[in-house]
Amino acid sequence: MDKYDLIVVGAGIGGALSAKIAAAKDFKVCLIDQKPEKKIGDKICGEAMGKHHFDNLGLAPPTGDELASIVKGIDIFSPDKKTIFRIEEEKLHGYMINRYELGQRFLQEALDSGVELHHSTQVLNPLIEKSFIKGVRAKNGSPKKLREFIGSIVIDSSGMDAIIRKQVPDDWIFERNLSGEDTAILYQEIREVSDIKEPAYPQIYLNQTISPGGYYWIFPKGQNIVNVGLGLQMKEGFLNPRKLFYNDLLSEPFFNNSKKIRGGGGFVSTRRPLNTMVGNGVLFIGDAASQPSPVSGGGIGPSMEAGYLAAKVACKAIEQSDVSQRGMWDYNLEYMTQYGGKSAGLDIFRIFLQKCSNEDLDYGMYNKLIKEDDLLKASIGENLKLNITDKAQRVFRGLRRFSFLKALAMTADKMKAIKELYSQFPQPQDHVQWSQKVESLVKEMKNMSI
């Protein structure tokens, strides 16, 4: 039996950062991952991330092999491709990264700080005693042998597997499993293209036929290399993303004579964060906490921010000998007030977009019911502003789509309301009532018709 101050399950970028921070403060830290050490960081990913995450945390930005290209804007295409929103703003500056190389850098920094790595180790379940998580049971070696890792606190950074979250004690009021409607299934490839100029900016395409409930993307990485893929909502009867990728997306002229380098599929959470990301003896970060952007699915930056906050709160809780949910509640408070409200607002917008037909999206973008600047502001946490002119109202009345305008206005109101709720994130004793208000608002949005 091995004993630690902190056990981190999952050596992704957020998990490795948490482990590094705690180890640098002389805590005994164990980092567990089911992949071999040299495979850690290899993950299906769009590989785009914002510069501000590195700036916020004082971390060195990607360089050398970690960096594919600099991003200074993004293009968003309507389904008919007749309207393009080009969003250029310093707040959106970022990077196209090489996910594996950046993941290996974060892992190495954790090891250099004194973290003990257990790779090729599969965590099976949490160890629970008197409604506290006290560690994990895992298996590794050849032949596989069971081991128990005991810790004051466990951080679940196990991604969509959410190994700990799905097995928390029965008496916890907790969101163990995510709805398929709040999850995206992805297929993505790195491809070499030839004879066609690469796009200047990353490109996102809205299309309910090719990527229903999601989008497809073409992200340039330089030297005729692109990250291309699609994600779609996993609602009942969802289609096979790989078939859509090959039957529809690769039929674009851009991909004539292109060549696959590597690819694969995966899943990502596309909803607001869990209503609580803290339990007795445990904290949740990244996909295990449902922290990726509900609209873009981007999760590296949020997992870094969460990894930093979780480590800070965990270290303080260990020092004060209070690893209860109440003793670590500050992680909820800090994350939800800084990032949760923005994410919840985008969750409302995501639900609206998934209800739209291609025709709705074409006309909405063509008439600029939401302008590029307003879309940018909404994406960074400001309220959604509408541009519903008399002309636009006449157009939509003529098309018998006035209900679309009403739905868009309702969406803006709901986004504002849910962000206000998150700005007043409660203490534990009031959390159930707060959660009920959030769930009621989200349910109203999901029941809305267009």
Image (tube, rainbow, N blue to C red):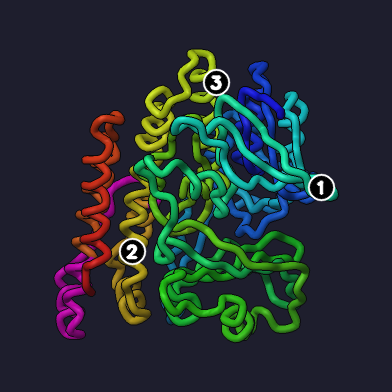
Q: Residues within 10 Å of mark 3 (few under 14, many from 20)?
A: many
Q: Position of residue 243 (x, y in %)?
A: 60, 82
The residue located at (74%, 50%) in the rendering is: 35
The residue depicted at 68 percent of the width and 53 percent of the height is: 69
Label 1 close to label 3 by CB (< 8 Å): no
For image coordinates 38% across by 40% down, the residue present is 172
* Picture disc at residue 139: none
Q: Nearer the viewer, mark 3 or mark 2?
A: 3
Residue labelled with disc 3: 315
Residue 158 x/y as whole percent: 59, 47
- Which of the marked residues, 3 or 2, is nearer the chain's N terminus? 3
- Disc 1 target residue: 38
Q: Which residue is mark 2?
A: 351
In this picture, is 163 found above or below 30?
A: below
**Residue 235 placement (x, y as % from top left):** 42, 72
Determine if the magenta segment contains residue 390: yes
- Judged left or right of residue 263, residue 289 is left
Q: Quadrant of residue 334?
A: top left
Q: CA distance from mark 3 to mark 2?
A: 37 Å
Furthest-front residue in this view? 130
Element at label 1: helix
Whether 186 is drawn above or below 100: the answer is below
Question: Could you give the CA–CA distance between mark 1 and mark 3, rounded to whole angstroms?
Answer: 28 Å
Q: Position of residue 83 (x, y in %)?
A: 41, 74
**Circle 3: residue type:** Cys
Task: Give neighbour class at mark 2: few <14, some 14-19, many 20+ (Cα, 10 Å).
Answer: many
